[in-house]
């Protein structure tokens, strides 16, 4: 996920670091897997 187009800042690593527990819970996945993948499956 980037802010301000393709040249923008990649904010996904920060979002995962700060909100990984909630993201993992919403996806019904272990937090460790979300951290290892570094992506949020669609």
Image: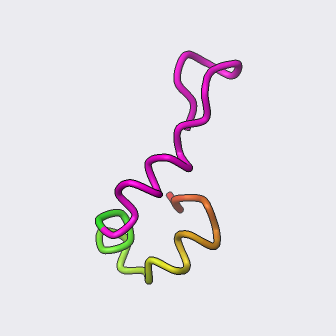
Q: Is residue 22 left or right of residue 11?
A: left
Image point (52%, 80%), residue name? 32
* 35 lies above or below 32: above
- In reply to whether residue 16 is colored magenta, the answer given is yes
Q: Does residue 9 appear left or right of residue 21 in this picture?
A: right
Q: Position of residue 16 (x, y in %)?
A: 46, 56
Q: Is residue 7 left or right of residue 17?
A: right
Which quarter of the figure is the N terminus placed in?
top right
The residue positioned farthest toward the right in the image shown: 7
**Of 26 and 16, the residue lying toward us:** 16
Magenta-highlighted residues: 1-21
Q: How is the image coloured?
A: rainbow
The residue shown at (70%, 18%) is 7
Residue 26: give x, y in percent of width and height: 30, 68
- The residue at 46%/57% (across/down) is 17
Total number of numbered discs in the rendering: 0
> In the picture shown, does residue 39 fall above or below 11?
below
């Amino acid at each position: 996920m980037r802010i301000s187009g393709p040249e923008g800042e990649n904010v996904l690593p920060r979002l995962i670091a700060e909100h990984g527990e909630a993201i993992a819970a919403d996806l019904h996945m272990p937090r460790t897997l979300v951290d290892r993948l570094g992506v949020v499956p669609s």
